[in-house]
Amino acid sequence: MYFGKGKIEIPNLTEQIKTPTDSSTAVFELPPAPEEVSGGEELFHFAVQEQEEAPSENFDNFDREAHLQLMRQNVSKYNYKIAYKHGTRIVSSLLANPELNAEWGHVLLEAGKPQEAVSALQRITSKDTVKSGAAIDMAFAMLRSGNADGAIDFLDEKIKNSNDVDLLAAKAAIIGEHPDTTRRVAAEPIFLRCVKSNQPSPDANYWYGRFLMQRGDYQNSKIYLERAAKAKPNEPRYIARLGMAEFYLKQDSNAETLYKRALKINPYDYNTWFSLGELYLSKANESSFSPDIRQKTHQALESYLKAIENDSLHPMANYRIGLILNGNGMNKEAIKHLLTALEKKPGYIPAMQQLSSAYIKIGDTTKSMSYLETILQIDPFDKVAANEFNRIKKLR
C-alpha cells in the first residue's frame, strides 16, 4: 500500500503497548527497530520537518480591547498558545483587574507556564473572596511548579471558608499526583466524600476517574469519567480521558471515536494526538496483515506529528517518530527527534538504543558506541547493549 511518494516499511512490533500512563508523560516500551529494511522496497519518505509556527500577527497594531477579545476568542477555541501571545501585550491591564487576572492566570496554566501562573494568581488568591476556579488554578499551578505540599496547604486554607466540593476534589487530585507516591493513598477517602455528596461536580468525577486510571482501575475509572462527560458532553478533557479508559479496556473502536471527538473540539491537545498515535501503533502491533500494519503505523506517525506540531518538545511523541523513521531507514531525520526526546527525558534507554542504531547505520561508530556505553553505565546488565557494543568494537 502506498502513502505519499513511496512505501512504508514497518518496524517489527512484537511488544504490547497498552501500558497505564499519565496523560502528561507517557512511558511505553518498544523493541529497537530492525537492523535492516527487508524486501528491498522503496522507502516511504514522510515529510518530517521542523515545525514552524504560523506567521505571527502584528499584535502591537491592536488596542487593548482587541487583544482582550482575541485572547478570549482563542481560549474558547482552546488555542492557548495564541491566547498567551495576545495576553502578553496587555499584561498590566490584566493584572490590574481581579476578574481579568483570573482569566490570565488560567491562560498561563493552560499554556504550560505554571510558574508565571503562580506569580499572576497570587495577586488575587490571597483574598478570602477569591472564586474557587481561580483558587483551583493556583493550586494546580503550584503543583506543576513542583510545590505539591504548598498547593495542598493553600487549598486547606480555602476550604476552611468554603463549602465548594470542587476545592476538596482538587485537593484530592493534587494528593493523587503527589511526587511522594506513599502519600497518594490519602486521596481515595477524600474523593469518595466528594463523589458521594448530594451534588458531585463534573470535575470531581473527572479527577476521581483520572485517579482511578493512574491506579490501573480502568473499569471504575470509566464509570466516573462517563458521569463527568454526561454532565458536560462538550468538555474535551473528559472525552479524551474517557477514550483512554476505553483504550485500556481494549475497546479500540470506542477509544478512537472518543479521541477524534475530543480533537474535533480541541485540535490543539497534543496529549490526545499522542494517545491517538498510541492507539494506532497498538493496532499495528496486534495485526498480522502487512497492509494493515503499514496503514496503522502511517496513521500513528501522522498523529505523533500532530502532537509535536502543538508541542515540539513532547518527549514520547518525538521518541515514537524517531523509532518509526529509524525503521524506515530515515536515520538522520530520526536522530533529530530522538535527541529531542533524550533532552527532555535524560537517561531514557530506549531513546539511546535508537540513537545508537541510527548512528551505526550512518557510519558514525564513535557516537553509536558512546550511547551504548552510557546505557551500560545505567544498566550494566543490559545484554542487548553489551552484545552490540562488543559487535561494533570488533568491526572497528
Image (cartoon, helix red, strand yellow):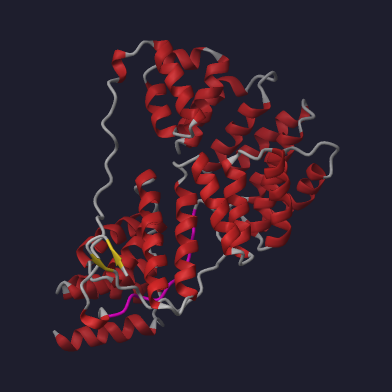
The residue lying at 54 percent from left, 57 percent from top is 256
Q: Position of residue 81 (x, y in %)?
A: 40, 34
Depth check: 354 or 186 in front?
354
Principal secondary structure, stretch drawn in magenta: loop
Please give left or right for residue 394 compared with residue 265 in the image: left
The residue lying at 42 percent from left, 76 percent from top is 13
Magenta span: 25-35
| Relative to 53, residue 176 above or below | below
Q: Residue furthest front?
A: 1
The residue lying at 53 percent from left, 23 percent from top is 103
The reply to whether the magenta stretch includes residue 31 is yes
Please give left or right for residue 366 compared with residue 351 in the image: left
Q: Position of residue 86 (x, y in %)?
A: 39, 23
Q: Is residue 145 visible?
A: no
Depth check: 285 or 358 in front?
285
* Quadrant the N terminus occupies: bottom left
Q: Position of residue 68 (x, y in %)?
A: 45, 17
Please give left or right for residue 210 compared with residue 91 in the image: right
| Relative to 285, residue 183 above or below | above
The residue lying at 63 percent from left, 22 percent from top is 126
Q: Quadrant of residue 43?
A: bottom left
Q: Position of residue 12 (x, y in %)?
A: 38, 78
* Quadrant the C terminus occupies: bottom left
Q: Quadrant of residue 344?
A: bottom left
Q: Residue furthest right?
A: 198
The reply to whether the magenta stretch includes residue 64 is no
Q: Is residue 247 visible?
A: yes
